[in-house]
Amino acid sequence: APTSSVRCETNAPSCGAETPWFLSLPFLPRRTRPPNDASVSQQPAPIRNVDAENLAAMPEAIVTLGEPAGSKEGFEAVSLNNKDQGSPDEMSYMERVAERVNGALTGFFFRVGLSIGTTPRKWLVGTFLVFLVFTTGVAYPGLTNENRSEKLWVPSDTQAQKDLTYVDGLYGSDARFGEVIVKPADGESALRPEIFEKMKTLVARIEAATVEWDGKTLTWSDQCFKVGFRCALSHFGIAFIGMAATDYDTEAEIVARANANPLRHLRTQMPINVDGVMGGITRDASGAITGAKALRIGFLTQNNEVVVNGDGEDLRGDAYEQVLLDILNEPHEGLDLSFIVQRSFSDEFGNAINADLGLLQAAFVLILTYAALMLSKWDEGCVGSRVAVTFSGIVAIGLATGSAYGVCSMFGLFYSPLMNVLPFLLLGVGVDDMFVIVNAYDLETGRNPSAGLPVRIGRCLASAGASISVTSATDMFAFLIGSNTSLPALRNFCFYAAFGILFTFFFQCTWFVAWLTVDEWRRARNGRDVLCCLTVPKNACCVCCAPRPDGRTKMGRWMGDVMGGFLAKPVVKVATIAAFAAIAAGGFAGC
């Protein structure tokens, strides 16, 4: 786009010197020199790659230096004499306010960037100290972990929470459960004598299980959940207690016992639910049982759960169930076992998470690789590589995550498994900020290559800072609005995310920009990326990365000429709108 030419009208003798770029910003307060009687008119600075026709069409900025304006001594406003924009008198009140806010915001980021570009090491130390201050909340008062579903997904201060507290206080927690499904490996009837005997052997091994705990040997009788004086253990074998082995050594005798009406425990005379001890039952026309595909063993054990950091733990129960799992995981000839105990849920979740750790690490590496490829200037070879800068941006996201966790713990917001997705959310936001900042710097360097590094960093942050401020603010406020939910887990997640986005914005504008400045020192002396002590020529590593006359990359050329031209066609526009309308309609229909 054409840039503004500048005419300086003042009595200052130094007016003929180069006018600082930021004086062309609309309504940006800047300090001026004391007036005198001299009057010098400055010619517009030479503009590259602009023809006479475009030069004539450029808007003209009038910069007037003289008496201090407003309540701030030595500052005054700069206005743009732009036909499209109109003079300040022609602008509405809201437009003038917006211009003032935009000017103040841009000026603030320029001064911050100028300071970072001048003393990046001080900013690195300072921002890291900020991280240390806020992340101390993770250690003190410390993260309060909460995994109990009734605390995560049931609104607090409700009657349901009060009832649960009352019941747990009077009756204690529920028992731990276990269940084993015994099926013949050949798929035939489970009521055959050989299958029945193997099931009884398995029950005997469960009842014989022991574990060393706290210097004592815990037996089945010590750990089982008792109903009256008997352990809660149900299986089809209890229907044969007290009977001679010869009374059920054939399939016909076992089937006959299954058809007893009513089917009772021979000693206690308690009724036995047939459907609770066998499955896949087959019956004849009269309803009599003729076979079953599986037998079931069900048992209950004691629950000695205690709450530690918001997570219910029963280490004794877990240890005993591990012994049972070891028994059940052994090979059992002729049987196909399916089983579950209380700890099986956490075991499976842990296995699933461990299996995904490799994928998560691969995802981080892919994101790092993509960001490094896109942010680097490969027409300069190893000098233009920005792997170290990209890594510093990822570190900034880590600093933001730790700071958010620390601040939220200071406010007493508990940590739940839902927060595990927060680093990935902040990774997306942070990498986007990195792209905006680096692209703004490269554009500024292309426009003003002769400007000093601190000035280019300041101009870069003046442009990019305002942009990422808007996106970060909208994201943060969206999560703050979501924190009004009554679900404790979701409410806390919204607070964690809001603080995470705020700290991501802060560390990207400070920590990352400081490292970008340090990396530019390396590029200025032709140092290698990462191995910055070594110097190499600033040449493209291959023909495909060689610089082009227009300065555009292959992707930029393809996006602008090929894809841009394709999307500009009327038929493609209509088809694109229709496709997205169909997607939206399908989404609404699915709701």
Image (cartoon, grey):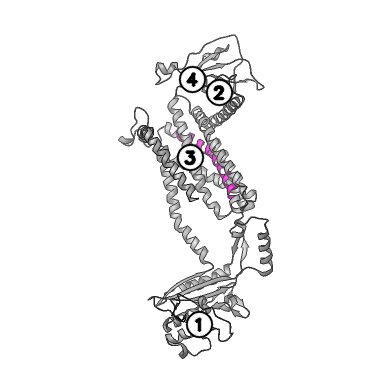
Callout 1: few (<14), some (14-19), or many (20+) C-alpha neighbours within 10 Å? some
Q: Which mark lies nearer to you, 4 or 1?
A: 1
Cβ–Cβ under 8 Å for marks 4 and 3: no
Q: Pinpoint residue 465: horizontal percent, then vertical percent.
A: 53, 33
| Cα–Cα gap, marks 4 and 1 | 94 Å
Whether residue 573 is situated above or below residue 317 in the rendered picture: above
| Cα–Cα gap, marks 2 and 3 | 27 Å
Q: Pinpoint residue 74: horizontal percent, then vertical percent.
A: 63, 20
Circle on res. 237:
1
User: Horizontal placement of 112 versus 360: left or right?
Assistant: right
Question: Of the residues shown, which amino acid type is indicated by label 2?
Answer: Pro
Is 431 contained in the magenta span? no
Lower sequence index among marks 4 and 1 = 4
> In this picture, which residue range is highlighted in magenta?
492-521
- At mark 1, the secondary structure is helix
> Looking at this rendering, what residue extends furthest in the front direction?
285
| Cα–Cα gap, marks 2 and 1 | 89 Å
- At mark 4, the secondary structure is loop
- At mark 3, the secondary structure is helix
Q: Pinpoint residue 15: horizontal percent, then vertical percent.
A: 54, 14
Residue at 59%, 53% (x, y): give it: 489
Lower sequence index among marks 2 and 3 = 2
| Cα–Cα gap, marks 4 and 2 | 11 Å
Q: What predominant SS class does the magenta segment belong to?
A: helix
